[in-house]
Image (cartoon, grey):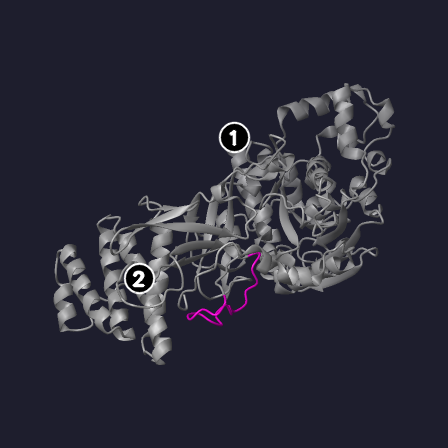
């Protein structure tokens, strides 16, 4: 029996991918940040130095060259010192010697000083690109290895040995909702590309900006905000291990490693800047280097890392239900922020929140949106009936929105509680169930008798009421439906849907409770409902009375709706569809706007047209909200208000 089931599960997976284009496979790993190889020599003397097997001899030779440079510094001889320092750092790193950090720091200082000399002397050096690459590589090395060498504590300090003494370099954190103590680990990768299914598209992900600084991923343990001596309730929605994007700016003055007479741009520092709160615009702070160069950013990097590290399996969640990893739950990408509007992503059947990475990137790539919205996500095992999953989301949102009622009355920048839910496929139905008043219609679609006449324990009745009787959530102001089957999908009635419904396992307590409910109420349910505990696929069939009833209920007046509908092919339904949901099933007359997009059911989430329409809708939502002291000018000035703790030290073109 076990072997037969496994064969059926394999057949189901094959049919699923073939029929729907579902991408549930593994995600390729992100690429570690690239560094350049050191150049060992520029002249015959350098070749002799490069041939020395003893790194100590190379260090001694470097010090002699430094003393010569101090007599008459030029961009050329300072650049050579930077190259030599970088080569020594790489060799020490190969020997697992923590002094590598000191020589990478020298590399950065020498390259910055060389850039200053070039600008002073109007010296256009042919190898300036190489200098930028070496500067960037040395910075990457420090960020990715100094913590392992015990030199970097991302929460507070970096230890570097200067010319005369050891220096404690302070670490600053600008514009983060995370506390400095939450900067536990730093990971450095190449900025990710956009994705189409499981393959990179070859184009940079939305929001990537080249410039000075190094985009990184910060890993953090769970944060707890304390109020009245107790953690706030919303902290339960932050994952135990979270990640977020940052841009690292590392600066060392030349005077730390040389006696050369020159003006310094300030003390050595490591600054982590929140790219979500700083506009990607050129700097104009009067500094010598990097004037007019924007800060490097990759808001997509943290989301890509989260997708890579996820242990969640959508197919397993569908087939086997709640196993501790796949349980339903709302989670925040960052700690709760009272001045931002919740943007909640709800995935569809045989899927998970990672399918929204491209859409989330599109939102975060827009400076106005990323300073006004906070992203939440809801994950649930999609095999069980979606009414139960919708009830769990409803309860989680009630807890999360309760926090918004405690906004400090002196804070004029607090966001209205008009949250937006973006639901893909079946997730759109879960979203709709948050903004409707159910009355008796949903219950009557599955039962022939009033719920008051059901013979069952109180716990069972309470669970039924939880799923079928509820009021709309007043805190939700808009729903964006993405390829949502309001009138079901023919695939749910086809062989792949029926096979999936048979394979979806339910928890034993649920099965026993359902069997007892049917036995105690023999005439209360239809024959199809009574024969087995329904799955989400059973309710998605176009003939389902539940889906028909739900399609006839209009959202509450406070919730506006928009639809993004895939319109890619006629097969297999011989009518316009996205290959899973017919256009006629996704259309709704009540929607404020409806956009047909040339995309498949899964491809619509990575469609640039869909991203552009979502961005437009979210901006429209902002424009229509009561301002309550929050103005467009305030949005544009956020970067100035959140990154002023310490002056940011520029670097040359990195």
| Residue 541 visible, this angle | yes
Q: How crowded is mark 2: few (under 14 residues within 10 Å), some or many (20 or more)?
A: some
- Residue at 61%, 64% (x, y): give it: 608
Image position, residue 484 (x, y; %): 72, 51
Q: Which of 161 and 348 is in front in this view?
A: 161
- Please state the extent of the stretch shown in magenta in the rendering: 276-294
| Residue 566 visible, this angle | no
Q: Mark 2 points at which residue?
A: 255
The question of residue 287 being in magenta is answered with yes
Report which quarter residue 34 is drawn in: bottom left
The question of residue 501 being in magenta is answered with no
In this rendering, the answer to whether 354 lies above or below 398 is: below
Q: SS of the residue at dot 2?
A: helix
Q: Name the residue under label 1.
A: 2
**Which mark's residue is nearer the viewer, 1 or 2?**
2
Image position, residue 564 (x, y; %): 71, 58
Q: Dividing the image into 4 quarters, which one contains the C terminus?
A: bottom left
Q: Is the magenta stretch mostly helix, strand or loop?
A: loop
Q: SS of the residue at dot 1?
A: helix
In this rendering, the answer to whether 647 lies above or below 420 is: below
Direction from residue 80 to residue 587 in the image, left or right = right
- Residue at 81%, 34% (x, y): give it: 469
Disc 1 and disc 2: Cα gap in Å?
A: 71 Å
Image position, residue 510 (x, y; %): 67, 26
Direction from residue 548 to residue 597 in the image, left or right = left
Q: Which of 147 and 180 is in front in this view?
A: 180
Q: How crowded is mark 1: few (under 14 residues within 10 Å), some or many (20 or more)?
A: few
| Residue 429 - label | none
In this rendering, the answer to whether 288 lies above or below 649 is: below
């Amino acid at each position: 029996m076990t072997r037969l089931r496994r064969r059926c599960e394999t057949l189901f997976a094959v049919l699923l991918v073939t029929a729907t284009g579902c991408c549930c496979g593994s995600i390729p790993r992100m690429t570690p940040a690239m560094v350049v190889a050191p150049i060992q020599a520029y002249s015959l003397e350098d070749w002799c130095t490069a041939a020395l097997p003893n790194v100590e001899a190379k260090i001694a030779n470097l010090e002699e060259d430094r003393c010569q440079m101090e007599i008459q510094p030029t961009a050329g001889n300072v650049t050579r010192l930077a190259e030599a320092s970088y080569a020594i750092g790489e060799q020490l790193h190969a020997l697992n010697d923590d002094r590598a950090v000191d020589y990478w720091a020298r590399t950065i200082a020498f390259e910055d000083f060389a850039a200053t000399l070039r600008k002073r002397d109007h010296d256009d050096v042919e190898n300036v690109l190489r200098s930028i690459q070496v500067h960037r590589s040395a910075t990457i090395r420090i960020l990715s290895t100094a913590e392992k060498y015990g030199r970097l504590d991302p929460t507070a300090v970096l230890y570097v040995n200067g010319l005369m003494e050891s220096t404690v370099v302070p670490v600053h954190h600008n514009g983060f909702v995370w506390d400095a103590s939450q900067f536990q680990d730093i990971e450095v990768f190449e900025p990710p590309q956009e994705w189409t299914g499981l393959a990179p598209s070859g184009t940079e992900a939305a929001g990537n900006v080249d410039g000075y600084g190094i985009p990184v991923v910060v890993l953090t343990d769970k944060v707890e905000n304390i109020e009245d001596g107790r953690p706030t309730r919303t902290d339960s929605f932050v994952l135990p291990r979270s990640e977020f994007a940052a841009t690292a700016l590392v600066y060392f003055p030349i005077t730390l490693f040389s006696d050369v007479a020159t003006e310094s741009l300030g003390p050595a520092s490591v600054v982590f800047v929140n790219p979500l709160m700083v506009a990607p615009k050129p700097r104009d702070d009067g500094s010598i280097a990097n004037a007019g160069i924007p800060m490097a950013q990759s808001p997509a990097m943290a989301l890509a890392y989260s997708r890579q590290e996820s242990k969640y399996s959508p197919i397993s969640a569908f087939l086997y239900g709640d196993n501790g990893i796949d349980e339903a739950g709302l989670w925040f990408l960052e700690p709760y922020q009272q001045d931002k509007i919740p943007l909640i992503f709800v995935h569809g059947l045989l899927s998970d929140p990672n399918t929204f990475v491209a859409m989330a990137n599109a939102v975060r790539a827009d400076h106005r949106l990323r300073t006004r919205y906070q992203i939440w996500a809801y994950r649930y095992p999609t095999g069980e009936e979606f009414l139960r999953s919708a009830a769990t989301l409803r309860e989680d949102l009630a807890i999360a929105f309760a926090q918004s009622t405690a906004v400090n009355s002196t804070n004029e920048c607090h966001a209205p509680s008009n949250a937006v839910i973006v639901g893909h496929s079946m997730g759109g139905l879960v979203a709709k169930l948050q903004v409707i008043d159910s009355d008796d219609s949903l219950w009557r679609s599955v039962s022939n008798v009033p719920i008051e006449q059901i013979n069952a324990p109180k716990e069972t009745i309470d669970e039924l009421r939880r799923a079928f009787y509820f009021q709309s959530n007043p805190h939700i102001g808009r729903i964006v439906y993405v390829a949502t089957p309001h009138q079901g999908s023919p695939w749910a009635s086809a062989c792949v849907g029926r096979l999936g419904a048979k394979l979806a396992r339910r928890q034993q307590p649920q099965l026993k409770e359902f069997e007892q409910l049917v036995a105690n109420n023999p005439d209360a349910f239809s024959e199809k409902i009574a024969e087995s505990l329904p799955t989400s696929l059973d309710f998605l069939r176009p003939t389902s009375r539940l889906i028909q009833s739900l399609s006839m209920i209009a959202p509450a007046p406070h919730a506006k709706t928009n639809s993004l509908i895939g319109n890619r092919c006629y097969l297999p339904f011989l009518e316009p569809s996205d290959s899973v949901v017919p256009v006629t099933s996704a259309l709704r007359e009540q929607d404020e706007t409806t956009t047909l997009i040339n995309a498949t059911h899964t491809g619509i989430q990575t469609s640039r047209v869909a991203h552009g329409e979502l961005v437009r809708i979210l901006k429209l939502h902002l424009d229509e909200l009561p301002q309550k002291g929050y103005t467009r000018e305030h949005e544009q000035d956020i970067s100035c208000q959140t990154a002023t703790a310490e002056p940011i030290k520029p670097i040359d073109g990195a």
